[in-house]
Amino acid sequence: LTCFFTPAIRIDYQPRESWRGLFFQMFRYGFGRSRLGRKHPRSLTLPSLVPALWLIWLTATLAMGFFFSVFAIVFAVSAAGYVAAVLMESLRLSWRRPWRFVPRVPFAFFAIHLGFGWGFLRERLAPPRRR
């Protein structure tokens, strides 16, 4: 099938009223994307895998950091790099907007990335369902 994108199509989007709502919206998106990937493996793209791989990376380096100090350093540097990238992008996106939005943008990124990644992993790690 061919998918076309056109400005003539209009979609109304209602933003979530809380970080929790955004997190669970993205959880459902990640869950659904993982289910689609089970059915159609070629549909999985690197951008759809990155949030889940990021959570695996953080979990693994944090766990290994309790046993090997080098992994604790790797975890800290990875987490700090992520937070720095999120803060820089948040400032860039907020540059010409009222400053009251600036502190909210990083939390939106966190909710999106963590929610999507967790939803993807939750579905991927669940046992396959029978029909």
Image (tube, helix red, strand yellow):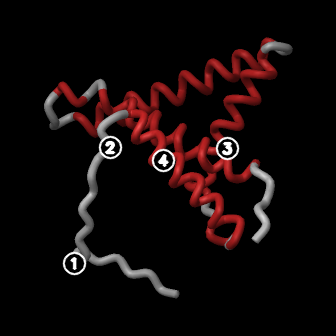
Foreground of the two, 55 or 131: 131
First in sequence: mark 1 or mark 2?
Answer: 1
Foreground of the two, 111 or 46: 111
Amino acid on which the number 4 mark rests in the picture = Met
- Which residue is located at x 45 percent, y 32 percent? 85
Q: Where is residue 57, by image quadrant? A: top right
Instruction: Give the secondary structure at mark 3.
Output: helix
* Residue at the spot of label 2: 16
Residue 126's x, y, as percent? 75, 50
* Residue at the spot of label 4: 26
Mark 3: few/some/many CA within 10 Å (<14, 14-19, 20+): some
Mark nearest the camera among 4 and 3 is 4
Q: CA distance from mark 1 to mark 4?
A: 26 Å
Amino acid on which the number 3 mark rests in the picture = Leu
Label 3 near label 4: C-beta < 8 Å? Answer: no
- Which residue is located at x 68 percent, y 46 percent? 121
Q: Is residue 73 above or below residue 110?
A: above
Amino acid on which the number 1 mark rests in the picture = Ala
Label 2 near label 4: C-beta < 8 Å? Answer: no
Q: CA distance from mark 1 to mark 2?
A: 25 Å
* Residue at the spot of label 1: 8
Mark nearest the camera among 1 and 4 is 4
Mark nearest the camera among 2 and 3 is 2
The label shown at residue 53 is 3
Amino acid on which the number 2 mark rests in the picture = Arg
Q: Looking at the rendering, in which quadrant would you find the C terminus? A: bottom right
